[in-house]
Amino acid sequence: MMTFTFFATSYLGIAGPGLDLKSSFVDSLQSFGLSTEMARLLWLPLPMLLVLTAAMVGVLVTVWLERKISAAAQQRIGPEFAGALGVLQPMADGLKLLVKEDVIPARADGLLFSLGPVLVLVPVILSWLIVPFGQTLLISNVGVGIFLWISLSSIQPIGLLMSGYASNNKYSLLGGLRAAAQSISYEIPLALSVLAVVMMSNSLSTVEIVNLQNDAGLLSWNVWRQPVGFVIFWICVLAECERLPFDLPEAEEELVAGYQTEYAGMKFALFYLGSYINLVLSALLVSVLYLGGWGFPIPVEWLASWLSQPIDAPLIQLVTGSVGIVMTVLKAYLLVFLAILLRWTTPRVRIDQLLDLGWKFLLPISLVNLLVTAALKLLFPLAFGG
Amino acid sequence: MSAFLKQVLGYTSDAIDAGKYLLKGLSVTFDHMRRRPITVQYPYEKLIPSERYRGRIHYEFDKCIACEVCVRVCPINLPVVDWVMNKETKKKELRNYSIDFGVCIFCGNCVEYCPTNCLSMTEEYELSAFDRHSLNFDNVALGRLPTSVTTDPAVQPLRELAYLPVGKIDPHGVASDQPRAGHLPSDLLNGLQKEAPLEKKSDVELSDGENLKG
């Protein structure tokens, strides 16, 4: 039983405060006669690969969900024949893009054209560095965690602008400009609403932020203390991901496909991948910042004590770790579902309405939210993390 | 100051209203999750065309008297009737007949006016071709029996909405012996025949009823 638990924990990458996965991996390799440095070096790529795979699988699942839920909202069936219920459809789409010809338009700027999609995708993947699925279940508990994400996400508009400019196409250029304008104007309310959470948690680290939300389960989630911040963050995140009602950089009725117009094959796939990874990432971050991250609605510690189980036992650790992963993913996918539902509910806003909403509505409100949070923190230090 | 406050309050109430409408819209979209699709999986499943469906025209060469009424009633004089006068018998001799279904609008005038009923509408609607010239049907092609959705073993025939039993929307899984909603023309006819001995004028209605059967 113990060996099973050990292997399960090492493969799933689960480790609570009681079980440190890295050290157990290193220890086991050392028992085979490897040096400590070598063992650590071997450990290094494992969590990265795991998270990268998780992100890719997340994208496949999201694409499938997007198509199925869109179909349900329109009383269609959606993908059905590729695999059971069409689950292999996103895979088939990806393979198709993989074998398509890689076209660079004749008068386009080749270097910038190729660099654009990379600059869009890489920061999004890098941001997965700070997404926690459990107490120690993240690649790196960076001290500036959430700030790192905000700064990485502001690299993206450069890539969009680059690809829009390099395509030598008026629609691409307009799309790229719109994307840049949108990202810049929604970055600020986004950062301000994150700042309010950070102020309450006294930390930028995502693990700390989640830990502070899990004292009393559901009731201690940030969404109750930051309802306005939650809404602002969600709106800004939708705008950052260029999802409806804010998908005007790629508004197909006006701009063909915006900055993606001239892209085909794998370069287009990078944009596609980037946008869906970003959606999943944003949903994960909403759940981390406002919905208690990996926390179960009733704290697992309470459940363990009711069942009179020691919380540090390996099996309990395994169970709590799994519950943590399931809860994080579940919350994130509920938010993805909401995003898809919103996509079929709301009409697209105009560019002036978009900028109006960003600068004249969200920005002042998020500022007021920040000030009110600060005041509440001074008034009720117990409830607002004084 | 009060003007400013009023503006802020108006703005707030606008925002709340917008949120309310958004939620209302979301509830509508969410409600659609429980409504099931009624997709017909063409070409594995096909809807049965209604009995007065105007599909590809069927033509019987031997019945045709080459009167060219079909040409005269056609909006664009489409049918080509190729005949010669036989001097000995002093009768028209039909050599060829063709209709171009790439041009035909399926109005059914030719069928309506044909004195010998050699033209008829079929329920065949799958007329796509790789070459538009192959849509010009000659008398052999026009004389072929139409394909039927109900007799094709590779096709699951499904009833159209108007032919489904009361309360049914999805044609899948509806047994073929379940009668459709409302009265069938034959029901109406039977009812009229029962009333016929009582009323004199029902003769007129009877003939109308017979037309209904069509």
Image (cartoon, coloured by chain):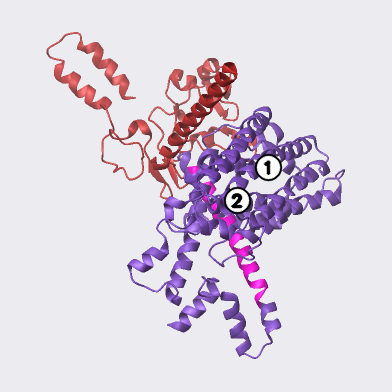
Q: CA distance from mark 1 to mark 2?
A: 16 Å
Can you say which quadrant of the picture contains the C terminus of chain B? top left
In the rendered structure, find residue B67 and report the number of the disc placed on it: none
- Mark 2 Cα-neighbour bin, 10 Å: few <14, some 14–19, many ≥20: many
Chain in red colour: B
Q: Position of residue A262 (x, y in %)?
A: 76, 43
Tell me the chain of label 2.
Answer: A
Left or right of B170 on screen, residue A29: right
In this view, the mark in front (1 or 2): 2
Q: Residue at x 51, y 79 (%)?
A: A7
Task: Depth check: give the residue in front, A284 or A108.
Answer: A284
According to the image, label 2 marks what residue? Answer: A198
Give the vertical position of B63 relative to A92 (above or below): above
Q: Which residues are magenta?
A: A43-71
Chain in purple colour: A
* Among the 4 quarters of the image, the one containing residue A29: bottom right
> What secondary structure is marked by label 2?
helix
Residue A230 seen by the camera: yes
